Image (tube, rainbow, N blue to C red):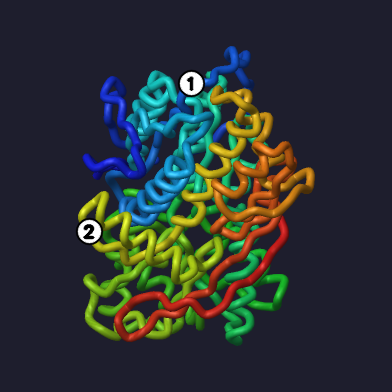
Amino acid sequence: MKMISKRSAGAVALVASAALVLTACSGGESAETAPAEESSTGALKIATLLPQTGSLGFLMPPVQAGIAQALADINAAGGVLGEDVEIVAEANEGDGADITIVEKGADDVIASGASFVLGAMSSSRTLHVVEKITGEGLLMGSPSNTASGLSGISPNYFRTAPPDSVQGNALANQILADGKSSVAFMTFNDDYGLGLRDTIQEVLEAGGAEVVYGAKGEGNEFPVDQTSFSAEVTAAKASGADALVIVTFDQIKAIIPELVAQGVDLSTVYLVDGNTNGFEADFDPGTLTGAQGSIPGAQADEEFQAQLKEIYSAEFGGELVSFTYAPEAYDLVTIVALAATKAGATDSASIQAELAAVTGANGGEECNSFADCAALLEAGDEIAYVGKSGTGPLNADNDPSSASIGIYKYDETNNPVFQRAVEGAI
């Protein structure tokens, strides 16, 4: 699965010298930043480190569409410093227990000559390589990392997705609002899974609910590469829980049939951003009716959805059915391009120095597109880019200072339907 098609997305150039590989996230302490390189005014070069294979692959289409649309809009407006933005490498983060893929991907993006590395999508994969990449002085940003441990991990790392504390709080409060008092968890043993489970559990227990299976400290999380879940479903069902929270990625496709086989009422199931996907082609109609899930970020408006569908069809030859993390991916590219424009340079250090400023951390005039924001910058004005994801300015930890979480409910076609947004400060 390729990030950039043979057709140019708004005159995007793919430099053939970079090896095309596939990669995905794990843990570490704060990275030391390498000495900044000399400022550059050449073309802004981006490398991607995304899950082109594995259990997060279902999230690739909307992220591809978001990146392609941002590049098209930026380059149509004259690019950055008069040159088109280029994707110079596409690396695969992989998934599961095999970390050699993301390590190879990190090597490739470092060698690519890029100033900005977009990815990884999985928090645990990012945690595994963030020190290596940012330690080379490269800027790194993710549209989907939510692990709390990534907050402030490096001056050269930022994200447009809110940390798990916001999503966990929103989903837990939805469960409590639904009148659930006993909750079971099925969680994989991964930084993302454990962190989100722990947050949800904390809020549930503070609200008077009891976690009767899968609680923190019980040790019944399952490996990320597990494929059979009969024992876990049996145990969760036997716990008598009136709600089941499933914190996984694509493993959900093996879990749902087991839930059906054991007679679990799927309207009592709650999913998270890693698995709240459309399943129209995977299960019989009505299988997931009433199940709920949460996805960080604003719901893409109809005009933006139409743009994403059109560019995805044109560039990748398929139908876009999900928009998860498309706004966040769009905003990542746009923020980096605006920071380079403000800095008058395209090297990592110059861009990093202006990231928070262009998001409105210091105030400034609100603007909603690269073209409008760039015009203000050229006039010498301070700006506050208000992007597609609806997040607030970057804070001192390089997290969005505020964000919304969407609550979704599955319909008869097994597709999640947006219900409402919960706003949260970080």
Q: Which residue, as the protein is rendered here, is positioned at the far front?
A: 379
Which of the pair 192/381 is nearer the observer?
A: 381
Residue 49 vs 204, above or below: the answer is above
Amino acid on which disc 1 is placed: Gly
Give coordinates of residue 95: x percent, y percent.
Answer: 35, 43
Residue contact between numbered discs 1 and 2, judged by CB atoms under 8 Å = no
Residue 245 vs 57, above or below: the answer is below
Residue 31: image quadrant is: top right
Does dot 2 land on a helix, a strand or a loop? loop
Residue 256: image quadrant is: bottom left
Give coordinates of residue 285: x percent, y percent.
Answer: 25, 83
Dividing the image into 4 quarters, which one contains the C terminus?
A: bottom right
Residue position for label 2: 318
Residue 229: image quadrant is: bottom left
The total of numbered circles placed on residues is: 2
Q: Which residue is drawn at 26% across and 49% down?
A: 315
Dividing the image into 4 quarters, which one contains the N terminus?
A: top left
Q: In this image, 65 relative to 317: left or right?
A: right
Does dot 1 land on a helix, a strand or a loop? loop
Mark 2, other Cα within 10 Å: few <14 / some 14–19 / many ≥20: few
Residue position for label 1: 42
Amino acid on which disc 2 is placed: Gly
Which label number is shown at residue 329? Answer: none
Q: In this image, 404 relative to 270: left or right?
A: right
Residue 217 at least partly seen: no
Q: Nearer the viewer, mark 1 or mark 2?
A: 1
